[in-house]
Amino acid sequence: MADIEVKVPQLSESISEATLLQWKKQPGAAVVADEILVEVETDKVVLDVPAPKSGVLAEIVAPSGASVTSGQVIARIVEGSPESAAPAAPAPITMPAAARVLKEAGIAPEAVAGTGRGGRITKGDALAAAQAASPAVAGGGDARGGAAPRQGASSPVPSPLTEIAAPIDSAALGNNRLEQRVPMSRLRQRVAERLVESQSTAAILTTFNEVNMQPVIELRNRHKERFEKEHGVKLGFMSFFVKAAVHALKRFPIVNASIDGTDIVYHGYFDIGIAVGSPRGLVVPVLRDADAQTFSEIERRIGDFGRRAGEGKLAIEELTGGTFTISNGGVFGSMLSTPIINPPQSAILGVHATKDRPVAENGQVVIRPMNYLALSYDHRIIDGREAVLFLVAIKEALEDPGRLLLEM
């Protein structure tokens, strides 16, 4: 019977290492060609590792949670059925502390791949298996990334082995002062590095403005049913913000520029990053050539980004590049924020919740659906005048959406 190697997929040149998530099969189990055996998490995306051929998973070389590199052998498959494979492996040797953990979690030792000497199951193996078996906690994410539960919900704890580990239930603990420690995922580590890098290398300043969303709301309500019928996608608000941002970027190209050493690089294209909070952390897929996209194409692409971000299925090339970013914390109820620039970009637009508020209009106090906009920008190349006028251009475009069609 042929011995088939299962290898880590080819990673991007910018990625040196990845982390194996939880194995979906254990040694001795039958596998089918193209069946997903494990996932590999990089600092950008999660990649599937399928079985190259059908057979029996004979050996797991790299356990869950291990650091791996491109092309590394992580398992071996023997062609044939379980009956035709080598004799069943003896029952795994379980260390006493590990046995207690597995018993409490209701997990059979045979279901755990031991990483100790001779295949022994260590306490760490048992804790990882118990954590992986915990029910996932659904949580939202703020627009700058990370699981951010709604008010009153438990805070989920990231884990490198599962999308989200079950958190400690503080309400049920009483006076027990327990703690829970889990390592950051590679994605979370990379998010942390980039945010610290942004704040330590850029001269970040934030300017604010408010926009009356009533004209956009009225336009959307007037056409949303026909729009969905003709294009097969719902008309949301993000397409308006994207179009308004492109409109303003064309008028103020410095906001679409970036710094490279002592040079300013002006970009003659508009690749807009859309910040998406996923269970594994912040991702910023890029909407390429946003100026050439129709409203329906923008809505379709953003919806697709959101779905695949939740599944960890975004490709690396979709997460690189970008000349400007939009962060929509309003979907989670954020009223105001100071978003952090996504380097090497020079600016980011923060969109917030639209709420009815009293405003002065022609000498009268009226109620209008208002949205606070925030523009964080790198003051090294963007002056306050350009930043303020850029945000005013977005405000004017949203308060008079016809400007987007007439390019005024």
Image (cartoon, rainbow, N blue to C red):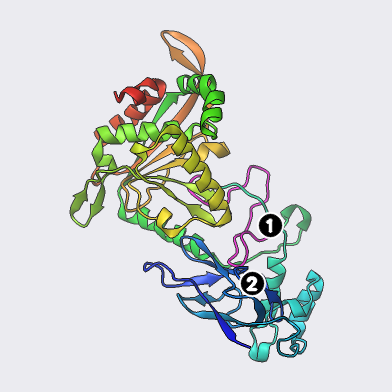
Q: Earlier in the sequence, mark 1 or mark 2?
A: 2
Image-quadrant location for residue 190? bottom left
Separation of residues labelled 1 and 2 (CA atoms): 16 Å
Q: Furthest residue to the top?
A: 363
Q: Amino acid at mark 1?
A: Ala
Name the residue beneath numbered marker 1. 136
In this rendering, the answer to whether 99 lies above or below 213 is: below
Place of residue 106 in the rendered image (x, y in percent of width and height, measured from the top left): 81, 71
**283 w.r.t. 178: above or below:** above
Image quadrant containing the C terminus = top left
Q: Is residue 226 magenta?
A: no
Q: Which residue is mark 2?
A: 23
Residue 284: give x, y in percent of width and height: 44, 50
| Quarter-of-image position of residue 268 | top left
Residue for point 79% across, 76% down: 108
Q: Which residues are magenta?
A: 142-168
Judged left or right of residue 36, residue 266 is: left
Q: Is residue 144 within the magenta segment?
A: yes
Whether residue 250 sits left or right of residue 38 in the image: it is left
Residue 383 appears in the rendering = no
Q: Nearer the viewer, mark 1 or mark 2?
A: 2
